[in-house]
Amino acid sequence: MFVTRLSRQKLIPRSLTRHLSSTSPPPPSSSKLHHLYSFTPPSSLLQNPNPNPKTLAPNKKKQKPPYRPPSSLDPTATKTLRSNLPFDFRYSYTESNEAVRPIGLREPKYSPFGPGRLNRVWTGVCAPAVDPTVRSVDGKEDPKLEDKKRKMREKILGEPLTPPERKILVEKCQRNRTKRQINLGRDGLTHNMLNDIHNNWKHAEAVRIKCLGVPTVDMKNVCTQLEDKTFGKIIHRHGGLLVLYRGRNYIPKKRPVIPLMLWRPHEPVYPRLIKTVIDGLSIEETKEMRKKGLAVPALTKLAKNGYYGSLVPMVRDAFLTDELVRIDSQGLERSDYKKIGCKLRDLVPCVLVTFEKEQIVVWRGKNYTPIEAGQFLSDRESFDDPDSDLVCGAEEHDSLDGSNTIGQ
């Protein structure tokens, strides 16, 4: 009997006996100790010392909430921005022509500012400063907005700069003095670029802007839109390099509210640039002119993201002797040389013949009259410096190189 009990005890492992002894319930209050000695165990022995072991475990890192696209957000949760800028908000102010109306939209009228973030209605092309339903059929801005824009600009600019003051500001914007620069590319002056300009004006009175690509075909429009939308003043221009002054009475803390576009809207559908039959010609004459235009020597070759400020005078000079002009645009994006051709049609003026084989072929037309001598010089009268020495030394060579690389 003793042997069997001992053998049974050896079969039970010690760890199991310890576990059974530790998990045994505490002695009840009706034990002999209570009756004999009036002993009552403390409450700490009767209660479980660790009732909820999960609470004492180390806190795990909270997981981030799942991503929700802007279209699923509640419009009432975001605060609506109100901007008092007296002009229509567009994606690009230099590459969009208010006179040309689209014939359709590629997507529904979904605001690029986000749902409920702006107190203006997106019409598919712009966010007008006034109610789009009360705008005139001509598409012109309200004259009150134009007057308000002029008063705001005069108030911010103050008295004009003296030649020494302007020279000091231009020297501060040289490349060897500061790295602050805003690049204006193929999209031209975009809406979000206005916010970048005001951010640079926090730390400096003037900012350097380098213009390259398609907008440089019409630099006068670039300078006009910059002054019109920022209420600043261009105090220096050399090729595609500009210096934009903020004004004497500009206060950074009272800068205008500029809501940012969260994404780029789709461009609307515009009429075709190249017609099947050119006006005033027959089908056979149009086909013959396109073949002839692709065979004429190229006037110049456009460099990718170059400076095209001298392209319009070159085409005007070529039309004095030639009827057709071909511009080699190999390597450029299709949308880029189409925009260049559209600008040439309006500025030269001329007739677009074809864009085949990455070539821009333009025709001067039957009743072509050359522009009067010296008329093209009026484009730079308001932006040239009266003093010949107001040229940034380091930037001058860069702009000269950029202006000469219209053909490679």
Image (cartoon, rainbow, N blue to C red):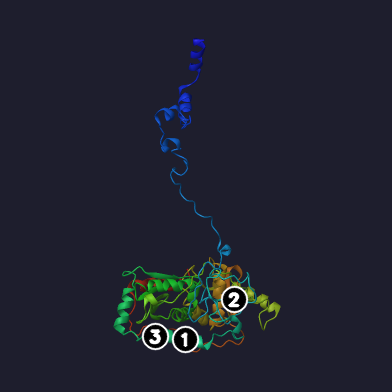
403 vs 177, left or right, is right
Residue beneath label 1, please? 148
Tell me where residue 357 sits by quadrant: bottom right
Disc 2 crowd, CA 10 A, few/some/many (<14, 14-19, 20+): some
Q: CA distance from mark 3 to mark 2?
A: 31 Å
Q: At 39% from the left edge and 83% from the top edge, which residue is drawn?
A: 156
State the image coordinates of residue 72 (x, y, percent, origin top left): 58, 62
**Dot 3 or dot 1, earlier in sequence:** 1
Q: At 50% from the left edge and 17% from the top edge, which residue is drawn?
A: 11
Contact, mark 3 vs mark 2 (Cβ under 8 Å): no
Using the image as rendered, state which of residue 313 and residue 15 is in the foreground. Answer: 15
Residue beneath label 3, please? 155
Residue beneath label 2, please? 123
Using the image as rendered, state which of residue 198 and residue 73 is in the foreground. Answer: 73
Disc 1 crowd, CA 10 A, few/some/many (<14, 14-19, 20+): few
At label 2, the amino acid type is Thr
- Looking at the rendered structure, the number of numbered marks drawn on it comes to 3
Label 3's element? helix
Using the image as rendered, state which of residue 204 and residue 189 is in the foreground. Answer: 204
Contact, mark 3 vs mark 1 (Cβ under 8 Å): no
Toward the right, the furthest residue is 283
Label 2's element? loop
At label 1, the amino acid type is Lys
**Dot 3 or dot 2, earlier in sequence:** 2
> Is residue 212 visible to the viewer in this orientation of the structure?
no
Label 1's element? helix
Contact, mark 2 vs mark 1 (Cβ under 8 Å): no
Q: CA distance from mark 2 to mark 1?
A: 23 Å
State the image coordinates of residue 97 (x, y, percent, origin top left): 55, 79
**Dot 2 or dot 1, earlier in sequence:** 2
